[in-house]
Amino acid sequence: MHSGRVIFGTFKRRLINLPSVKTTRPTTDLLKESIFNCLIHRFNIQFEEWSVIDLFAGSGALGIESASLGAQQVLFFECNNVAFNCIKSNINNLNITDISYVGRINVNNINWKLVFKHITNKNIIVFMDPPYKETELLIKHINIFKDNFNFLLVIETNTPELLEIYNPCYVLSNRSDKSVVFIKHDKYI
């Protein structure tokens, strides 16, 4: 297994395992640092006031980073067995099992009504790094969240159609073939 590191917060500099499977693309430390700098400094996110959902979680690095910064609750969803076991190992090693849930499930099969009943906060950050070219899957999940919560979606994508469909509040370009899109919705504010 490969390893990455936690960039911010309580677990800063702690190593986490990354799954050695071709079906996942771990977010680089540099991109992760850029994403969390945007969340902290541009959006003034106080993680203690937010729950986090990490869809297509891979190693769980983004959710773990959120837990390190004080997120109330972190839910990880990953269907790959190797990646799922990697997430479980990481949350056990960091001793964050009390605020974490890990589901081994394809995101298309998640019972969102059941998940929403167990979310402790109406403010949710959702990290999505789905397989590229899965525009329909992205749109489906954006629509699920927009009617239920104050949310901030952080989407790693190479799908420019997303920019045409939704009006992102911020786009962080990392490489010419990949962008991180921030979509914000304040339903209750």
Image (cartoon, rainbow, N blue to C red):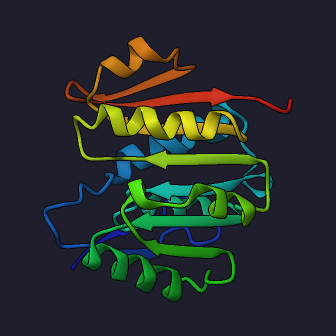
Classify residue 96 as left or right of residue 129.
right
> Whole-percent x and y of residue 9?
63, 63
Classify residue 13 as left or right of residue 116.
left
Which residue: 32% across, 47% down? 130
Which residue: 42% across, 86% down? 89
Does residue 57 appear anywhere in the picture? yes
Report how many numbered discs are placed on residues in the image. Answer: 0
> Whole-percent x and y of residue 157?
32, 34
Q: Is residue 159 above or below residue 8?
A: above
Q: Could you say which quadrant of the image residue 176 lies in?
A: top left
Q: Could you say which quadrant of the image residue 183 lies in?
A: top right
Does residue 9 appear anywhere in the picture? no
Nearer the observer, 137 or 49: 137
> Whole-percent x and y of residue 173?
35, 26
Task: Kindly give the residue lying farthest to the top in the view shown.
Answer: 164
Which residue: 21% across, 79% down? 1
Q: Quadrant of the C terminus?
A: top right
Which residue: 39% across, 68% down? 105
Classify residue 175 as left or right of residue 36.
left
